[in-house]
Amino acid sequence: MIWHPYTIGKQNFEPLKIKSAKGEFLISEDDKEYVDLVSSWWVSIHGHNHPFIKEKILSSLEKLDFTILAGHTHEAIIQLTKKLLEFTENKFHKIFYSDNGSNAVEIALKMSIQYFENLEIPNKKEILHFSSSYHGDSIGAMSVSGKSKLNDIFKSIFFESTEFISPDCYNCPVNKNPNNCNLECIDKLEVYLEKNHKTVASVIIEPIIQAALGMKFYKKEVLQKMEMLCNKYNVLFILDEVFTGFGRLGKKFAFLYAEISPDIICLAKGLTAGFLPMAATLVNKKVYEGFYFSEPEKAFYHGHTMTGNPASASAACASIELFEMENRLDDIKNLENFFQNKIIFWKEKFDKKIFNPRNIGAVFTFEMGNENSNYFDIHSKKLKEHCFKNQILIRPLGNTVYITPPYTIDLENLENCFRIIESFLKNE
Ligand SMILES: Cc1ncc(COP(=O)(O)O)c(C=O)c1O
């Protein structure tokens, strides 16, 4: 019997059985085509079952099933590493592979602690994080995620990490106007670092959009100031790009969108475009130099069994190639134009029914209910049911509804999905 993730135990629920998938469609056992407006948990960036990726995986499997990566290497991982370093515009120096986003984060956190230990700079052990962040479901990732109903039960076993209020330009935590603010939302971080930098190892944040805890958008200047503070106080700056990486914001990565150079980035989800599990933690030269010693005790003793899996590496290589081959960033630009037009229309048409319709790249999101609605608001649940009846899959985050389709979605199909959502909003 399957224990389904994020699913209430005692619930009258029949999971939708999917038998196949193609492009933006998931096809159920009874031959209905459902539009996957969430790219299946944000992974299927080129659409489902892209033949180019499938072919590369199959030809990889013809040659090599698996080999341990500790002390060994293989062609697929060598090729992927070359491609991924180029794709991240040569800002990074080494790539550490794992198999999911939570692990990519755990690795970044552990590296940031050991970095200062190896350099014999004592006491730099604290990792700072933000309130609406989500970095995964393992204990370390939860320790640096925003505290919420989803992780509250485990809080007594989290390691200590100071939580700062999240930047949010659509609901400013310090009541400023983002068009002319002085980034007051990070004043507390600045004061904390000034006082305590000798005990701080790193700062971790989801760049530009804090996704899973409410699609909170903030401007790039916030990241630029954080980068400046981290550099000033010798603190490593970690960006969790598990959601934002691989084009979601219209640039290849959010750090390029924000025009900054973080020390470490975490990637997963879009890395293999949904075909196989894989994650990567990329570090710059400065971080790697903290591990470049001959003493065995300064090595990074971390490794997951399936690390560097050849078929996953081949899928990731093919996915990166597709960005060039099929001009994927142009598709995202077209999606962004589509969403921008919808924002203009929705603001006029659905004022007071929805709030803060917003978009960057291939992300469209808004809140439902009224200004006091919270995570348990029922409006979005009703919208989800309406969509499901019309063969559209969405997964609202409480009263926040988001649309993050495969970049290749046909815009007429998308328009049709919007019509169905709009018909619901009209009658609300
Ligand atoms: C920003 C971010 N970091 C980390 C994770 C965890 O990734 P995984 O589910 O692959 O462990 C997620 C998952 O949604 C995420 O959105």
Image (tube, rainbow, N blue to C red):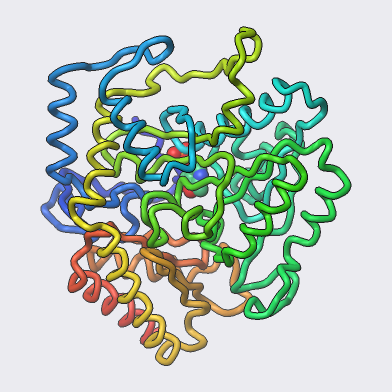
Determine the residue located farthest toward the right in the rendered image. 195
Residue 109 relative to residue 47: left or right: right
Q: Quadrant of the N terminus?
A: top left
Where residue 193 appears, x then y in whole percent?
Answer: 81, 48
Give the tally of numbered discs: 0
Where residue 248 appears, x then y in whole percent?
Answer: 39, 57
Residue 94 vs residue 409, the one in the foreground: 94
Q: Quadrant of the C terminus?
A: bottom left
Q: Quadrant of residue 125?
A: top right
Q: Quadrant of residue 299?
A: top right
Camera sees residue 10: no
Where residue 328 appears, x then y in whole percent?
Answer: 25, 57
Q: In this rendering, is residue 61 above or below 72? A: below
Q: Residue at x 79, y 26 (%)?
A: 121
Q: Residue at x 45, y 87 (%)?
A: 347
Residue 42 relative to residue 91: left or right: left
Q: In this rendering, is residue 424 above or below 99? A: below
Residue 160 relative to residue 130: left or right: right
Residue 110 relative to residue 173: left or right: left
Camera sees residue 70: yes
Determine the residue located farthest toward the bottom in the rendered image. 348
Q: Residue at x 51, y 56 (%)?
A: 211
Where residue 331 appears, x then y in whole percent?
Answer: 25, 64
